[in-house]
Amino acid sequence: GGKILSRDEIPARMNLLLQCCVLSIIPSSLVAHRNGAPPEACSSLMPNHGVKSTPNNTGFFLFGDPLSGRYVPGRTYRMRLVATIGDFSGFFIQARQESNQDNVSSIVGTWAPLSGDARTEQCNGIRRNAITHSSNVRKIEQFFNWTAPNETVGRIHFLYTVVIAYTHFIVKLNATVERPSSTIDPPPMPPADAVFPNVYRQPEDCQQSNCTFYVEWRNNGEFIDFRMEGNAVGWIALG
């Protein structure tokens, strides 16, 4: 009762069957990782590519004000992941409490992507508490917003994994520890009796000891020397 296939129909049917078989044996993890880290990576930050990670950081760093471990509850900070050598295709980032940073339950804060190459992930049942890549397009840098928890939870650490290639990745780097080194020696400190002819202060009529912000500078012929002081909780900067 079945239909007898003509000679012209057989190759087309076999070709379709072969394509279906090939698609069915492609590992699902290989495809899924193109859209970011899988949920099972939340605890270990391991991408589960079936190979061991690279032991040392080879030039991938996370920057942002909260890396000191201090933050203002509820405040949003801009964070930057950058490759100082080469590029990368994937990443996975979390902030965890220092006191329990090996436990996935210690993840704090929420993330928001600032580009089309990132998306948030839900770990431990909490939405947007991690961020990962949304495509495997090669990247040099990525920007995100991280919002601190509404209440102080102690010092925090930012942990991150970077994927350079499917068989080349670096797992669970600590952004507080992983800082870029410099091969340039810092300039010498100016002598104690050095004269600084240029001054900026706020308020304009304040004395140095009671200014909200005070900076003085001089050109020493090779560098510009600055001295700064002020009344601030945390740090002060000049731009």
Image (tube, rainbow, N blue to C red):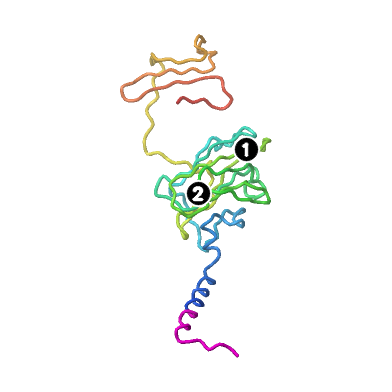
| Residue under label 2 | 117
Magenta range: 1-14
- Could you tell me which residue is drawn at 50 percent across and 57 percent down? 53
The 10 Å Cα crowd at callout 2, few under 14, some 14 to 19, many 20 or more, is many
Q: Quadrant location of the C terminus?
A: top left
- Could you tell me which residue is drawn at 61 percent across and 34 percent down? 75
Q: Observer-nearest residue: 150 or 8?
A: 8
Q: Earlier in the sequence, mark 2 or mark 1?
A: 2
Q: What's the amino acid at mark 1? A: Ala
- Which residue ends up furthest to the bottom in the rendered image? 1
Q: Observer-nearest residue: 179 or 84?
A: 84
Q: Quadrant location of the N terminus?
A: bottom right
User: Can you tell which mark lies on residue 148?
Assistant: 1
The 10 Å Cα crowd at callout 1, few under 14, some 14 to 19, many 20 or more, is many
- Which residue ends up furthest to the top in the rendered image? 205
Residue 140 placement (x, y as % from top left):
43, 47
Q: Observer-nearest residue: 12 or 177?
A: 12
- Could you tell me which residue is drawn at 58 percent across and 46 percent down? 94
Tag 2 secondary structure: loop
Tag 1 secondary structure: loop
Residue 228 placement (x, y as % from top left):
47, 21
Residue 48 in the figure: left or right of residue 139: right
The correct choice, above or below, for 216 with respect to 92 in the image is above
Query: Which of label 2 and label 1 is nearer to you?
Result: 2
The correct choice, above or below, for 2 with respect to 225 in the image is below
Query: In which quadrant of the rendered view does residue 112 lie?
Result: top right
Magenta region includes residue 9: yes
Magenta region includes residue 12: yes
Residue 2 placement (x, y as % from top left):
58, 88
Q: What's the amino acid at mark 2? A: Asp
The correct choice, above or below, for 17 with respect to 29 in the image is below
